[in-house]
Image (cartoon, rainbow, N blue to C red):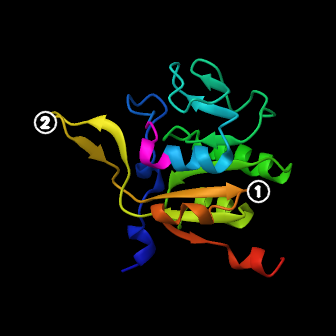
Amino acid sequence: MRIAAYRFDNDKRRRPDHHQRQAMLTPGYVLEPVRNLLGGIGLDPCTEPDNPTKATTFYHLPMDGCALPWHTGPVFCNPPYGEARERWVERCIEEGRRGNKVVLLIPAHPDTKNFQRALRACSTVLFVQGRLKFGVLRENGRQEAASHGSALFGFNVDLSPLQELGVVLTPPALQRGA
């Protein structure tokens, strides 16, 4: 028997781009400390029309925030949970390389390409303790928790002051100056 024949299909981890629950609004207990750390959010490139992150500049559907300018101050990005997430992760990495401050929130799936790329490029990573509750209500009125852990990646941002949210690490490659 070949083990490779039983590998998990990563496509099952992503929601189709047309899924009704693409938007998972960042809970306030995560968003407020991030906003304070950044001194305010200059841009949220993928939010809702009512701008729940209180960003100075914000993009929402039908705008393609991933393709629009990101030169408006510190960026907070909680990208859609579909196949397009890869574009968003790449854009956050690109903006970090340009010297911009970016905080990216994605699922903590360390075996995925997106996670690995973000980890190689970030200044710090914060593994959020517990599972985030994104404000999606169940039929019984209770909030639905994510089915996975989450991680915040800081690009040109030291996430150490947010230790109350979880464990903060500096990737070893960055510590060695590699």
Q: Quadrant of residue 154?
A: bottom right
Q: Is residue 70 left or right of residue 33?
A: right
Please tell me whether residue 29 belongs to the stretch shown in magenta.
Answer: yes
User: Which residue carries the number 2 mark?
Assistant: 140
Label 2 element class: loop
Please tell me whether residue 7 belongs to the stretch shown in magenta.
Answer: no
Residue 114's place in the image compared with 123, above or below, is: above
| Residue at horizontal 53 percent and vertical 51 percent from the top | 106
Amino acid type, mark 1: Asn
- Crowding at dot 1, Cα within 10 Å, few <14 / some 14-19 / many 20+, comes out as many
- Crowding at dot 2, Cα within 10 Å, few <14 / some 14-19 / many 20+, comes out as few
Q: Nearer the viewer, mark 2 or mark 1?
A: 1
Residue 77's place in the image compared with 169, above or below, is: above
Label 1 element class: loop
Q: Quadrant of residue 22?
A: top left
x, y percent for residue 157: 71, 57
Mark 2 → mark 1, Cα distance in angstroms: 41 Å
Q: Quadrant of the N terminus?
A: bottom left
User: Which residue carries the number 1 mark?
Assistant: 156
x, y percent for residue 33: 53, 50
Q: Is residue 103 left or right of residue 100?
A: left
Q: Is residue 128 left or right of residue 61?
A: left
x, y percent for residue 68: 75, 27
Residue interval drawn in magenta:
24-30
| Residue at horizontal 13 percent and vertical 36 percent from the top | 140
Q: Are marks 2 and 1 in contact (CB under 8 Å)?
A: no
x, y percent for residue 155: 72, 55
Amino acid type, mark 2: Asn
Q: Quadrant of residue 57?
A: top right
Q: Name which of mark 2 and mark 1 comes first in the sequence.
A: 2
| Residue at horizontal 76 percent and vertical 74 percent from the top | 174
